[in-house]
Image (cartoon, rainbow, N blue to C red):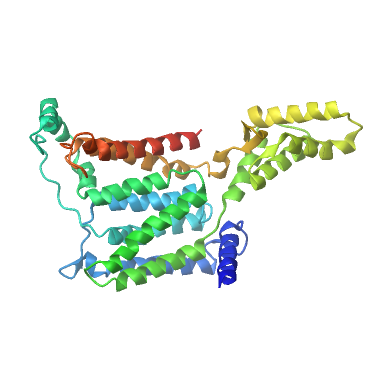
Amino acid sequence: MKRLAAASAGRAREWLCAPAGNDFGIAGFRCWKFWAVLAFYLGGFLLLVRDPFFLRGGAFSYQQGMVTLLLAFVIVAALCWEMMLFGPPRGANLLLQFMMCLPAFLFVARITVAPSMPPADVGVISLTVDGIGKFRQWLGIGRLLEYIPFWIRDLFANWQVTLFFMVVMGALSFRRTGVRLSLLVLLLAVEFFAVFAGRGSAPDWLLGGTICLLAGMGLQFCRCDRIVYYENVVDRLSAAPCDESALRAILRIAAQGREDGRVSEEGVRRIVKSEYGSLGNFSAAEFGCIASELTGRILYEYRIMHLSGGADGVFLIPAPNLCRCETLLGGLSVWPRVIFTLLAAVVWVLLPVDLIPDSIPFVGALDDVTVTILSGIVLRNAMENSR
């Protein structure tokens, strides 16, 4: 049994880590997979529309507020345009990636299972009569909240959904794709299975829509980050000319950095020696000078790698932004979640929404501090990834 589980895990890892090829993703509008994926996405959307959870008087009625729409869009954008799991964002792939949003919107709204209530008219905050409440009244925060638009206040109509939104944003801020994807799947799985454990309408339509959504995602799956990496490397190398041997050496260094995650000084020297050895009898010092010159061009002229030092030596590390598609959609997957996370943190502190009453000394501020820390982590990682 253990061997079977290990073999299955190994095959799944190989499938997830496999580079894009002819057998992966959508080749174009004439590919049969395009029409199959389109049918799955539309089928999943129609099944979720027929879920009794969304029906009011026999007609579809969406009452889950803005936060679930924002959450679903950010998740789809992160999967498609940041992690690059569903092919390059162009042509048939791009159309299907936008079509993925339709069932994803309703799926996220269904698993959160918290219809939003119209937020109450925001007046002077008077949750408590203690010193903190009086201090807020003295500052006039209630009058300030009156200027916040309704669609922003609607983000906080259900604090449980808003907190889940913040946690998902924090999970998507990790650097490693595997960590982000595993945390995202875990969080969505918890919410998904909670629907089956709770009371309410039968989740048959949800199950059917989820199966269609996952089937479409499985057919469209195509890890193209490696292709994007080499396209960006070649694009940067075309900015400044270099001789053929230097070009081959730089490409080999970039390829080794992509496969191994880093390239040591000795690795650079070996590559330089193998490329320049046939051109003449160079001494070790001359090979070192050539390696230093190529390293300088890689770091400062082409900017495809950067230095990272530690106790085990100095290494060349591939630039993380080379694996992202340099288009408008690349930023669209990062900055919306940064903006809305910061907005959520600010409004969370201002609105009369608390997991722990502020009247409790010290402990009452923990929820506000936690939300602020989460938003700070998201902002810091976004700034580092956008360099």
Q: Quadrant of residue 240?
A: top right
Q: Residue 27 versus residue 386: which sits nearer the camera? A: 386
Is 83 on the left-hand or right-hand side of 71? right
Above-or-below relation of 59 to 232: below
Q: Quadrant of residue 344?
A: top left
Task: Give the number of marks.
Answer: 0
Residue drawn at (19%, 34%) of the image: 361
Above-or-below relation of 261 to 138: below
Is 363 on the left-hand or right-hand side of 95? left
- x, y percentage for residue 175? 49, 43
Asked whether residue 332 is in view, the answer is yes
Above-or-below relation of 274 to 185: above
- x, y percentage for residue 80? 47, 52
Name the outermost residue toward the right: 281
Is 260 on the left-hand or right-hand side of 362? right
Q: Residue 378 versus residue 68: which sits nearer the camera? A: 378
Name the outermost residue toward the left: 129
Residue drawn at (60%, 61%) of the image: 14
Asked whether residue 386 is in view, the answer is no
If the image is split into quadrants, where does the N terminus sit?
bottom right
Q: Quadrant of residue 40?
A: bottom left
- x, y percentage for residue 288? 80, 28
- x, y percentage for residue 184? 41, 54
Residue drawn at (32%, 48%) of the image: 165
Above-or-below relation of 218 to 233: below
Q: Residue 19 versus residue 380: which sits nearer the camera? A: 380
